[in-house]
């Protein structure tokens, strides 16, 4: 089963999404989308499936996922309330050519690294959480500068682990359907407690 292709739910006054999703709207099947995604888990716990990575997530964890990287996060049990602040943005949301500026080199490198999924850790995770919460409430130009601040913090501090070893381009190959079936089976049948 191929990952579901998700479309970005943009409003007329926004160039990217920053909102909290909570049970039952948190539950999303194995999917992918062209947007990059920053996820801060604010409640709950469970299993994370990112590319070919299977691990755990808990309240306070933060992931940065690259464009078209298949993923899902499944709560530990069906009755558990789970929620996350989710920020989704396109590579060109700030306009074409912006990332080509010399000052954006570290952001370009970060987005390239995120193609394998990043789990943020250390002091960066602690500093990033309130920025992501604030981003959800920000309006106007402060939304743009807030997201830039989040990305710059991750890029400069480099406190993250790469979670998947699978190149995203491999998911676009002839083997994609077989890989997706394996992951769908694993997700559906992985019942061990966290």
Image (spheres, rainbow, N blue to C red):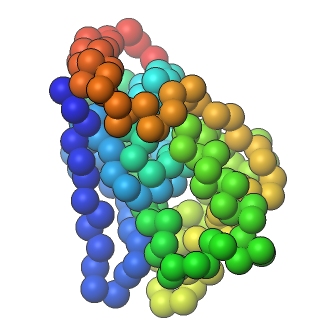
Picture coordinates of residue 17 (x, y %)? 39, 68
In this view, 159 is above or below 13: above
The residue depicted at 29 percent of the width and 26 percent of the height is 174
Observer able to see residue 148: no
For the image, the number of numbered tags is 0
Quarter of the figure with the N terminus: top left
**Residue 127 quadrant:** bottom right
With 94 as the anchor, is 187 left or right in this view? left
Observer able to see residue 174: yes
Quarter of the figure with the C terminus: top left
With 105 as the anchor, is 96 left or right in this view? left
**Residue 46 quadrant:** top left
**Residue 169 quadrant:** top left
Picture coordinates of residue 81 (x, y %)? 32, 39
Picture coordinates of residue 93 (x, y %)? 47, 75
In this view, 155 is above or below 9: above
In this view, 56 is above or below 12: above
Q: Residue furthest left?
A: 1
The residue depicted at 67 percent of the width and 54 percent of the height is 110
The residue depicted at 39 percent of the width and 47 percent of the height is 68
Q: Residue furthest front?
A: 174
Picture coordinates of residue 117 (x, y %)? 55, 39
With 11 as the anchor, is 127 left or right in this view? right
The residue depicted at 58 percent of the width and 71 percent of the height is 147
Is residue 142 or residue 41 the one in the foreground? 142
């Amino acid at each position: 089963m191929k990952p579901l292709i998700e479309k970005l739910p943009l409003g007329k006054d926004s160039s990217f999404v920053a909102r909290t999703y909570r049970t039952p709207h948190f539950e999303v099947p194995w999917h992918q989308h062209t947007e990059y995604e920053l996820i801060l888990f604010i409640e709950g716990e469970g299993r994370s499936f990112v590319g070919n990575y299977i691990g755990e997530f808990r309240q306070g964890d933060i992931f940065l996922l690259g464009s078209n990287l298949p993923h899902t996060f499944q709560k530990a049990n069906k009755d558990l309330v789970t929620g996350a602040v989710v920020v989704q943005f396109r590579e060109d949301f700030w306009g074409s050519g912006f990332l080509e500026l010399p000052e954006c080199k570290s952001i370009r490198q970060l987005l390239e690294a995120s193609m394998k999924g990043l789990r943020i850790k250390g002091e960066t995770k602690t500093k990033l959480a309130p920025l992501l919460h604030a981003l959800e409430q920000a309006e106007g130009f402060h939304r743009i500068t807030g997201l830039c601040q989040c990305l710059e913090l991750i890029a400069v501090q480099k406190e993250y682990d790469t979670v998947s070893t699978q190149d995203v381009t491999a998911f676009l190959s002839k083997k994609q359907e077989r890989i997706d079936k394996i992951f769908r089976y694993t997700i559906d049948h992985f019942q061990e407690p966290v």
